[in-house]
Image (spheres, rainbow, N blue to C red):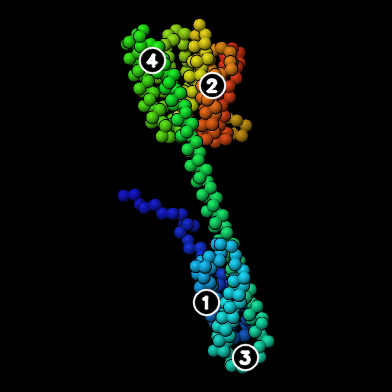
Amino acid sequence: MTPPHRPPLLARIDWYWTFQLAGWGALALFNSVYGGSSQLRIVATIACWGSLGGLLLSHLWHGVLRRRGWAVNGLRWKRIVPSLILLAAIQTASVTAAFHVMYPPDILRGIAWLPGALLFWFGVFLTWTVFYFTALSLRRAARLEAETLRLQLHGREAELRALQAQVNPHFFFNSLNSVRALIFEDREAAAHMIDQLAGLMRHALQSGQHATVPLAAELDAVRAYLAIEQIRFEERLRVSFAIEIGAHDVEHVRVPPMALQTLVENAVKYGVEASAEGADIRIAARRTSPADGAAMLQIDVANTGALREPGNSTCVGLRNARQRLQLACGERASLELREQAGWVHATIHLPERA
């Protein structure tokens, strides 16, 4: 049986009482030392009595602040300061009573000591209140930051789902056009194409529930798509794969779903379809090691031909692919399109996340 999940130790600590006991305990120690070495037992007893009284009064004060909302709806200093004076007066009376119990009645003569005692305890409760308000502000700031991060995450997920919803209909529309073009020419080939398209639909539906999928699953979907286009273009479409195989197979690295499909579709449209002789398409994936040492995955989809001004549908696909890479894989992910030595390269760089 799996043990129930427990929150971290720091989350289980009651920080309010931890700081209460630590603070008033430290004050009792300070008053014991400051009170002198003579009759240390009596001095320590009175110091402990004062700290216990202060602990009780501060806890009651804490309840007043929470019930009246003085610490939430703006600091009501016009009400807080008189309350602190009252707390100081009660605490001074309590400690004075302890002095009369523990010492001879004439130990406290006159009232010259009274302003100093009131000022001391007023300062103690003022310090307590400032620390309490500071702790509340820090906690509210932390909660606000956590809520902001949560909303940002939900926003990123919603944006990613919206971008996937734009890509998938565009892809299936093109695939259905391919089926339609073949159905009156070769029914058997059209049936095979429909089987491949069903596999692609299954992959799209399953992968659409996740921000990333294994590269191996993306490659299977791309192979199914190219099988459809191979029936359509025959010898005009020539495909080769160069997927790095090693101890840590790159096919297990996770990539945004349908991102590779968009680049392959673009290569078919502007490489094979635009040329009477067709085109070669080369799909490669390998690890790279940038100067900072962080492992990156490079996926390159290249087709023979020249770089052309893409149409509206392809612009949407490439723009969405870039945005989805950034959303799913972070700011280091990138997509570049370039022409080199008779080849048009669409290259993805993304941090490796196995």
**Of callouts 4 and 2, the N-terminal one:** 4
Q: Which residue is mark 3?
A: 107
Q: Can you name the residue that lies furthest to the right here?
A: 112
The dot on residue 52 is: 1
- Which residue type does callout 3 highlight? Ile
Residue 211 lies, in percent from the top left, at 46, 34
Q: Compared to 74, does 209 lie above or below? A: above
Q: Is residue 187 left or right of residue 302?
A: left
Tell me the CA gap for discs 3 and 2.
Answer: 94 Å
Tell me the CA gap for discs 3 and 1.
Answer: 23 Å
The answer to whether any part of residue 48 appears in the image is no
Disc 4 vs disc 2: Cβ atoms closer than 8 Å? Answer: no
Q: Residue at x 59, y 62 (%)?
A: 74
Q: Which residue is mark 4?
A: 179
Tell me the CA gap for discs 1 and 2.
Answer: 76 Å
- Which residue type does callout 4 highlight? Val
Nearer the observer, 315 or 114: 315
Q: Compared to 341, does 91 lie above or below? A: below
Label 1 or label 4, whichever lies nearer to me, is 4
Q: Residue at x 53, y 80 (%)?
A: 49
